[in-house]
């Protein structure tokens, strides 16, 4: 029995417990991660609400659901208001000699989550950003005399053309990143696992469809983060973004950090025909 088959078997055993019961049984471990019993209760309620709003989550493998939930908890990011998302998708797993599609839950980092993590860093002072439209006045320059000026147009601003993010640090430094609208979408198509290459579109439940502005801001923020003094939390969050981990509630206290577990996402487009996301 290979690793995929073992994990699937373990997940099927976990399925005997309803997802709501799994969440309830996880509250003590959530409290340890969040350092607060009330915060754990609130976190569990948010997760339960997510399931009611998106019932397909309950149809995913419990181990992947637990993995996404505990990943968010470890980062202390509630999956609400653009901080993070728990998304259902089809994962490709090789069982024996056959590739199979299995419903999984993926942790997706939101741009507001990166903002929260930025402000936890000792060097952070302020983070500002903007969406540039074609009728706005916008100019910037990189290098030793770097500057960025953006004045919103009054009235019709036209189509979106670019996004920018600027960070102010304790030492007085001001760092910024600019990406065009097309560059952001190209980055999403290249790196997001919610891009259907065969259908040449993002899956309907992808945040790139539901929250395009947020995902574009997140893309620019991640690029800017490469030039900032990164906290361990930010590094872990970027590492965990759009990943799937398998966690059993009984194993949480034994595995150290959830994010250090291997990403179980396997997008084998050669072996498995692309399929619309849940």
Image (cartoon, rainbow, N blue to C red):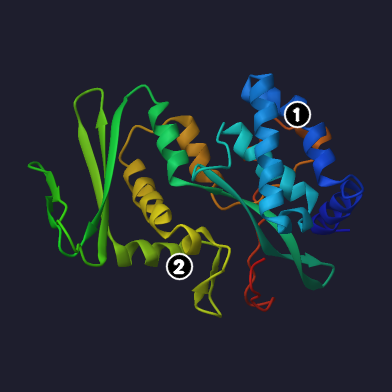
> In the drawing, what numbered circle is on residue 27?
1
Mark 1 neighbour density, 10 Å: few (under 14) some (14–19) many (20 or more): many
Instruction: Identify which residue is drawn at 76% across, 56% down.
Output: 60
The residue that disc 2 covers is: 189
- Callout 2 secondary element: helix
Image quadrant where one finds the N terminus: bottom right
Which is more toward the observer, 42 or 250?
42
Looking at the image, which residue sits at the far top?
Answer: 36
N-terminal label among 2 and 1: 1
Image quadrant where one finds the C terminus: bottom right
Looking at the image, which residue sits at the far left?
Answer: 145
Residue 156 locus on image (x, y percent): 19, 64
Residue 152 locus on image (x, y percent): 16, 52
Instruction: Identify which residue is drawn at 42% across, 26% down.
Output: 120
- Callout 1 secondary element: helix
Can see residue 123? yes
For marks 2 and 1, give the CA distance: 36 Å
């Amino acid at each position: 029995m290979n690793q995929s088959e073992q994990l699937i078997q373990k997940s099927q055993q976990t399925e005997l417990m309803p997802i709501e019961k799994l969440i309830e049984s996880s509250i003590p471990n959530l409290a340890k991660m969040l350092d607060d019993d009330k915060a754990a209760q609130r976190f569990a309620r948010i997760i339960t609400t997510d399931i009611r709003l998106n019932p397909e989550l309950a149809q995913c493998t419990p181990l992947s659901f637990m993995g996404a939930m505990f990943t968010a908890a470890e980062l202390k990011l509630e999956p609400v208001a653009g901080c993070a998302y728990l998304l259902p998708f089809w994962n490709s797993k090789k069982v024996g000699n056959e590739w199979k599609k299995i419903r999984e839950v993926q942790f997706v980092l939101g741009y507001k989550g990166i903002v929260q993590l930025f402000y936890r860093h000792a060097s952070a002072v302020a983070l500002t950003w903007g969406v540039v439209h074609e009728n706005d006045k916008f100019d910037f320059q990189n290098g030793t005399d770097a500057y960025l000026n953006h004045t919103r147009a009054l009235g019709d601003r036209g189509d979106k053309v670019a996004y920018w993010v600027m960070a102010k640090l304790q030492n007085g430094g001001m760092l910024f990143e600019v990406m065009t609208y097309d560059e952001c979408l190209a980055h999403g198509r290249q790196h997001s696992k919610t891009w259907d290459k065969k259908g040449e579109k993002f899956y309907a439940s992808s945040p790139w469809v539901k929250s395009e502005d947020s995902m574009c801001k997140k893309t620019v923020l991640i690029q800017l983060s490469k030039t900032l003094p990164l906290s361990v939390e930010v590094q872990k969050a970027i590492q965990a973004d759009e990943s799937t981990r398998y966690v059993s509630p009984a194993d949480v206290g034994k595995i150290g950090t959830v994010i250090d577990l291997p990403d179980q996402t396997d997008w084998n487009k050669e072996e498995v025909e692309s399929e619309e996301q849940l």
